[in-house]
Image (cartoon, rainbow, N blue to C red):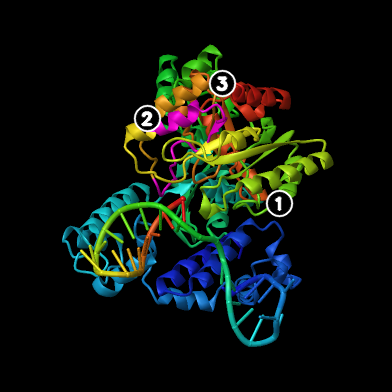
Amino acid sequence: MDKNEISRIFEEIGVLMELKGENPFKVRAYYNGARIIELMEEDLHQLVEENRLHEIEGIGKALEEKIIELVKTGELEFYRRLKEEFPEGLLELLKIQGLGPKKVRVLYDKLNITSVEELERACLEDKLSNLKGFGEKTTKKILEGIENYKNFSGQYLISTGLAYGNEMVKVLKTNPLIKRVSLAGSIRRHKETIKDIDIIASCDEDNRLAVMDFFTSLEGIKDVKEKGITKSSLRLPMGINVDLRLVGDGEYPNALQHFTGSKEHNTALRQRAKEMGYKVNEYGIFKGDNPQPVKTEEDLYKLLQLDYIPPEIRENNGEIEAAEKGNLPNLIKTSDIKGVMHIHSNYSDGHNTIEELVQKGISLGFKYIGISDHSRSAIYAGGLKEEDIKRQHEEIGILQEKYKDIVILKGIESDILADGSLDYSDEVLESFDYIIGSIHSNFSMDINTMTKRLIKAINNRYLTILGHATGRLLLSRPSYTLDIEAVIEACGKNQVAIEINSNPHRLELDWRMCRFAKERGVFIAIEPDAHRVEGIDDIQYGVGVARKGWLEEANVLNSWETDKVLEFLRKRKSNI
DNA sequence: GTATCACAATACCGCACGGCCAACCGTGC
């Protein structure tokens, strides 16, 4: 059993214990354990072999025993028994906004509600208002939550898709019968959320059955939903479906192109092919009945007299016209990133010391790294008081002496307060190299008040970067209401950069707005919002969003050389 | 359940807000 699966089980144990009403700290120990295992760099099996699990902070005797049982037997008696105490549907109910373990428990105990459908019916029949702690407003709120849930159900974050998808592809590559294999579909296009994992592979016709046997008997799958010689579908324990399509190697480029989509892109591409006297489908490209020789996806686009269109921008947003004219953007790459500025240290709610973060930056070849802890109003996150800031700046000074190959910047992630002001006096704000401004509280404002609040912050000369501009959390919380276009325009006018927050739950500024920002001369900072060293690797997801938004090096602040970035920060601050 | 400078007993981010019910509890950041 691999660490992702063990992490998932601990997470679920945490949820079930909350339902049971266990001691909240005990519950947190399991959530904490799940996170530690997920982010662990060492080999879990090796740690079990060497009996070294307890050396990890946060893993005590009880969790150690459970991990060992899972690794050795693939099962966990404690988990099995815990699961039996509640019907499976209750876990789904917890995903509904406004419903926590306590309320779900009451719904189950008093009304025997075990599924979202039953809950919806009970709300519509007004059965909840008789329950203690429930009233008219709660029912209304739950119904809204259900609506929201329905829009999100069956979807997963791109990070989840990539983690499992890449692993699947890696395993398939070990099979010598498979000639070529790749992820396809929305994962390959780097959509922020995905429904399933699509994989395309090629092999000789005689080997199809053997390859499908291999695929459907892989370790760690929950069940096989369908099995054929051209398509098989299976489900992973966490619920996500994986489809494998198997074609001959000659058909591979077309199949890959076809199943990468998007549907809209393919429709437009087929239309173009038709005008040129070709026919394109998932099996090939034809002139009359004659298949045209195509060895790669690149060949296919070339035959249609187009530059190669990267998968991320295949959304029928003008990419075909641009490819025709040779005007495709030279999309930003992860290797272009020269530093990051949105990182939390253990001064606030981050896990690592500044020195550890700096060392990680150096190991990634960064030329600069900025520390931006939470500001004083973010009490839940240990926001920095003025004396903490002084202490932090002193430490950064000392570290800068020690590490000469990287520039360490003094930043802060300042809360944008309800009235649009930043979280410290001008004198304190002046002491930072840059300031990221983000909204963390008072989300429910009408569109005008919220837009004014943001624009007031953007007009403040100390604000350098607007953090997670719309506050959405993918698959759980919609953006707050704001006039995003007005906000972007204000950023352009003031030369305030906008962040693409690379945390897989955020991934905003949304790629759909990136081109709007680009066209208005707004610079984008692709930031990890890391709370521990490993979190910095999340920039890969942010880069995916930037690519989807047609961004190039010139648009991305932290792909610039150090001098240019420092100049940008200095200029902004002195712009009175 | 974990960590701890008391090895048995204690602390573990802490506050705002909304809603139900009348002073608080659950949810969410």
Q: Nearer the viewer, residue A341 or A203?
A: A341
Q: Nearer the viewer, residue A335 or A425?
A: A425
Q: Nearer the viewer, residue A405 or A19?
A: A405
Q: Which mark is residue A161?
A: none
Q: Which residue is mark 1?
A: A353
Q: Which residue is mark 2?
A: A483
Chain containing the residue with disc 1: A
The answer to whether residue A177 is visible is: no
Q: Nearer the viewer, residue A244 or A532?
A: A532
Badge 1 crowding class, 10 Å Cα cut-off, few under 14, some 14 to 19, many 20 or more, is some
Residue A525: in magenta span: no
- Tell me the quarter of the picture where residue A559 sits: top right
Q: Which residues are magenta?
A: A451-477
Percent position of residue A343, x then y? 63, 43
Instruction: Name the mark nearer the viewer: 2 or 3.
Output: 3
Image side of residue A332 versus residue A402, left or right = left
Pick whichever of labels 1 and 3 is earlier in the sequence.
Answer: 1
Percent position of residue A98, x then y? 34, 57
Identify residue type, mark 1.
Answer: Thr
Q: Secondary structure at mark 3?
A: loop
Q: Residue furthest left?
A: A125
Rendered residue at 58%/51% (across/down): A168
Identify residue type, mark 3.
Answer: Ile
Q: Secondary structure at mark 2?
A: loop
Residue A468: in magenta span: yes
